[in-house]
Image: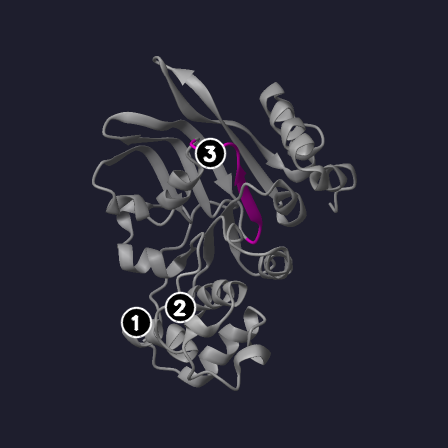
Amino acid sequence: MQPSPLPTSTVPDAILQMEGLSIYYKDRPAVLEVSLEILPRQLTTFIGPSGCGKSSLLGCFNRMNDLVPTARIKGRITFKGVPLGQIPQVMLRRQIGMVFQRPNPFPKSIYNNIALGLRINGYQGDLDERVEVALHQVGLWEDVKDRLRQSALTLSGGQQQRLCLARALALGSEVLLMDEPCASLDPISTGIINDLLNDLKRHYTIVMVTHDLKQAAVVSDQVAFFDMAPYDGEQVGRLVEFGPVPDIFVQPSQAATWDYMYYQALSKPSLSGALASPSF
């Protein structure tokens, strides 16, 4: 049994939309009044200082925040024109997969890390073929084809992260949410992931949170910059600016964006080259 298709969208462009979205924890606002559109087959990155609500917003797209008892969400989110509340959670999370900051492979074989989810979801096709295709998609097949029955925990950190990505792709995810996917990886593994992201975004919609501005400049199509702003005596997250990579990195319209980019360029000299000679 293949995953059930979702209702056809009436929205011509955006695959995901947030309208006036606010997130509260124990009635304390974390991020307020965010409206943006995520376009299909593009990579959209959320950047900004810690604590401004980027990961919380990311988790709204597949209703991960429903699992947080103290979380309360106001506003509207749609997936292909359909309000998220009208989509069963199991179906939604098949269509919108999540890759977390730290690799989280199951303590099972490399093969079963991918096959298990397929079995649970009643997949009736050729499991061996589906596993192989998913591993090819993330550039892992040649590395692991002779040790599929070995534990996934024997893989390097970068390989484990790619395996987790393969797991989401195997289930038929149309959208990939990635919460700082390279934060715990070395520069070589990060480069491999960046190359993979540039390839995958031709076929999938990707929304990513990162603190690595060089990564954001290299792989993104659209960038949303968030910052802290005063509200009712507290500092809360706000969307400052959202647009194509050149607009945000080279010609931002808001002073707060300029300040953030300038500070990051000074603190990380390797970023200066990426901003001076962007690859877009």
Residue type at mark 1 is Asn
| Residue 115: quarter of image | bottom left
Q: Which residue is mark 1?
A: 121
User: Which of the marked residues, 2 or 1, is nearer the chain's N terminus?
Assistant: 1
User: Which of the marked residues, 2 or 3, is nearer the chain's N terminus?
Assistant: 3
Q: Which residue is mark 3?
A: 50
Q: Residues within 10 Å of mark 1 (few under 14, many from 20)?
A: some
Q: Which residue is mark 2?
A: 171
| Residue 28 relative to residue 195: left or right | left
Q: Position of residue 234 (x, y in %)?
A: 36, 17
| Residue 225 relative to residue 117: left or right | right
In depth, the one of 163 and 87 nearer the eye is 163
Compared with residue 101, is residue 268 higher up or lower down, i.e. above or below? above
Q: Position of residue 222 (x, y in %)?
A: 59, 41
The extreme right residue here reads 277
In depth, the one of 168 and 183 nearer the eye is 183
Cβ–Cβ below 8 Å for labels 2 and 1? Answer: yes
Compared with residue 240, is residue 132 higher up or lower down, i.e. above or below? below
Quarter of the image where the N terminus is located: bottom left
Residue type at mark 2 is Leu
